[in-house]
Amino acid sequence: MRESELRLAVAEEFGALGSVLMTDLTLSTLGGRTGSEALAAGVPAKRVWQALCDAKDVPEQRRHGRGLRDPRR
């Protein structure tokens, strides 16, 4: 997962609240860092997405494929 895909996935799942969650919600599985802090520290975007989904109880079926754009034709 790329950072751009993470940001799209967060926006799709959480709407306007997504940017707040990335900057304000501390995630224990990421060492008490926010999603934005974890990315800046080099944590892979996929791991940040998984941690955010775990913290917000996102159902498994909505975690996969988020952030992917439709293929070009």
Image (spheres, rainbow, N blue to C red):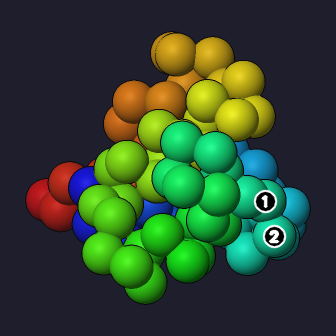
Q: Is 68 situated above or below 55? A: below
Q: Secondary structure at mark 1?
A: loop
The residue positioned 51% from the left and 15% from the top of the image is: 61
Image quarter where the C terminus lies is bottom left
Q: Would you name the residue on which mark 2 appears? A: 24
Kindly tell me whether residue 4 is visible in this rendering: no
Q: Quadrant of residue 64?
A: top left
Percent of width and height locating residue 23: 73, 75
The residue positioned 54% from the left and 42% from the top of the image is: 29
Name which residue type carries label 1.
Answer: Leu
Residue 25: image tag? 1
Q: CA distance from mark 1 to mark 2?
A: 4 Å
With 47 as the anchor, is 63 left or right in this view?
A: right
Percent of width and height locating residue 66: 45, 43
Q: Secondary structure at mark 2?
A: helix
The residue positioned 70% from the left and 35% from the top of the image is: 55
Q: Are marks 1 and 2 in contact (CB under 8 Å)?
A: yes
